[in-house]
Amino acid sequence: MQIHSSQEQLHILLEKTEADFLARVFRTLDMEYRIPPAEMDSKIERVWYSDEGHQSAGSSVEDREEWRRMLHEFRGENTKKIKSWLSTLQQAKNSIAWNFPLADAETLLAVVNDYRLALASKCDVAETEMEHDLDLIQDPVKRTALMEIHFLAWMMELILAEIG
């Protein structure tokens, strides 16, 4: 993966396997973003829609529900960009030059981080395990989740360094 920007565009050069992986990430998010918070996997709901801060601040139940509804709508708006990105990535034959407006980088970072949070939560990856040597993780599901989380973190770091 190579990332650079020019003329208000972000350019990401991906190998086919990287493009396929990101396409899978985007398909997953497209489905998850459509599920209302009350109906989704409780682990994902907890990391995406936690209202602990609102509770401790004394917000009313109605205000917390309104906040969750608005946050769900906000995530739902990202599906338009996700579908566009997915369409581009699915065209990869060997490698692909994925170009999009630099202004969309913030959305890309947000949705990629949503996937990382959801995956860590679903696979019960503790924060203390994030820095473990992957060879020491015995559970193959957790090890795979950590590899995906680390790959996406690396991608996010490259993007942030480029748009810095």
Image (cartoon, grey):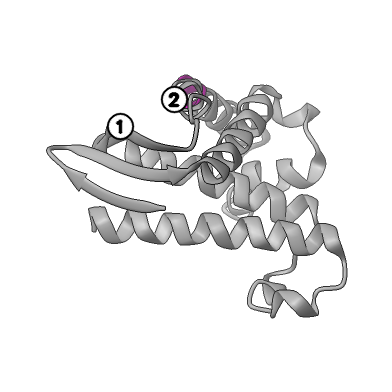
Residue 2's disc number: none
Task: State how far apart marks 2 and 1 are (Cα).
Answer: 10 Å
Q: Report the magenta residues as a range.
A: 77-82
Dot 1 alpha-carbon crowd within 10 angstroms: few under 14, some 14 to 19, many 20 or more: some
Residue at position x 76%, y 64% from top? Answer: 143
Residue 124 appears in the picture as rendered: no
Q: Residue 151 placed where, x, y %?
A: 55, 58
* Residue type highlighted by circle 2: Thr
Q: Is residue 104 above or below residue 112?
A: above
Q: What element does badge 1 sit on?
A: strand
* Residue type highlighted by circle 1: Phe
Please indicate whether residue 23 sits to the left or right of residue 5 in the image: right
Kindly indicate whether the residue at mark 1 contacts the one at mark 2 (C-beta within 8 angstroms).
yes
Q: Main secondary structure of the magenta part?
A: helix
Dot 2 alpha-carbon crowd within 10 angstroms: few under 14, some 14 to 19, many 20 or more: some
Residue at position x 27%, y 41% from top? Answer: 10
Tell us which disc is closer to us: 2 or 1: 2
Query: In this figure, which residue is indicated by the disc labeled 1?
Result: 100
Quarter holding residue 135? bottom right
Number of marks = 2
Query: In this figure, which residue is indicated by the disc labeled 2?
Result: 88
